[in-house]
Image (cartoon, rainbow, N blue to C red):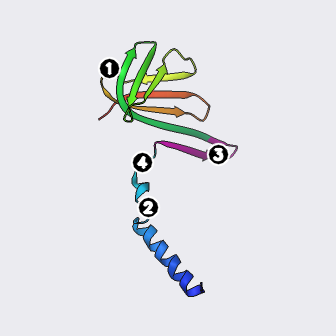
Amino acid sequence: MNSMTSRKSLCAVSLALALGSAVPALAKAPVQEKKNVSTATSEVSSSTRTIVGTLSDLKAGHSLSVMKVDRSVETYDLEDKEFTYNLEPEVKKGSAVVVTETVQADGKHVVSVAAKK
């Protein structure tokens, strides 16, 4: 391949990427995201995972289960002291919910359950 052909190929790829036509799959939102924040003394990292589904079971103070779109069930132990749980008051069994699990920079786990809007 000569240098003229490789420049044309590079230009075509750059144009396709700029127009977004080469990567339509990236238009979907990621389920998990990781953020790194650098400070003057150290690097701080946190991660987030989001689940969308239906609240299939809720035992106040004990556990909750969410049936995801793929029909698998995610269960949370509300008595686990390593996690902090935040449930919106309008969330009840059978509700469409969005569960956001966050591991904060200090290692704390926070799970928020909100009604899907």
The quadrant of the rendering that contains the C terminus is top left
> Circle 2 sits on which residue?
23
User: Is the stretch drawn in magenta largely helix, strand or loop?
Assistant: strand
Residue plotted at (48% across, 17% down):
78
> Circle 1 sits on which residue?
93
93 in relation to 117, above or below: above
Amino acid type, callout 1: Lys
Q: How far apart are marks 1 and 2 (CA)?
A: 39 Å
Mark 4 and mark 1 residues within 8 Å of each other at the beta carbon = no
Residue 115 location, quadrant: top left
Badge 4 local density, few (<14 within 10 Å), some, or many (20+)?
few
> Circle 4 sits on which residue?
29
Residue 29 horizontal side relative to residue 95, left or right: right
Q: Is mark 1 on a helix, strand or loop?
A: loop
Q: How far apart are marks 4 and 1 (CA)?
A: 27 Å
Q: Distance between the residues labelled 2 and 4?
A: 13 Å
Farthest residue, direction right: 41
Residue plotted at (40% across, 50% down):
28
Residue 113 horizontal side relative to residue 109, left or right: left
Amino acid type, callout 4: Ala
Mark 1 and mark 2 residues within 8 Å of each other at the beta carbon = no
Residue 51, numbered label = none
Q: Does the magenta stretch include residue 41?
A: yes
Answer with mark 2 or mark 3, whichever residue precedes in sequence: 2
Write the start and end of the magenta stretch as one range: 31-44
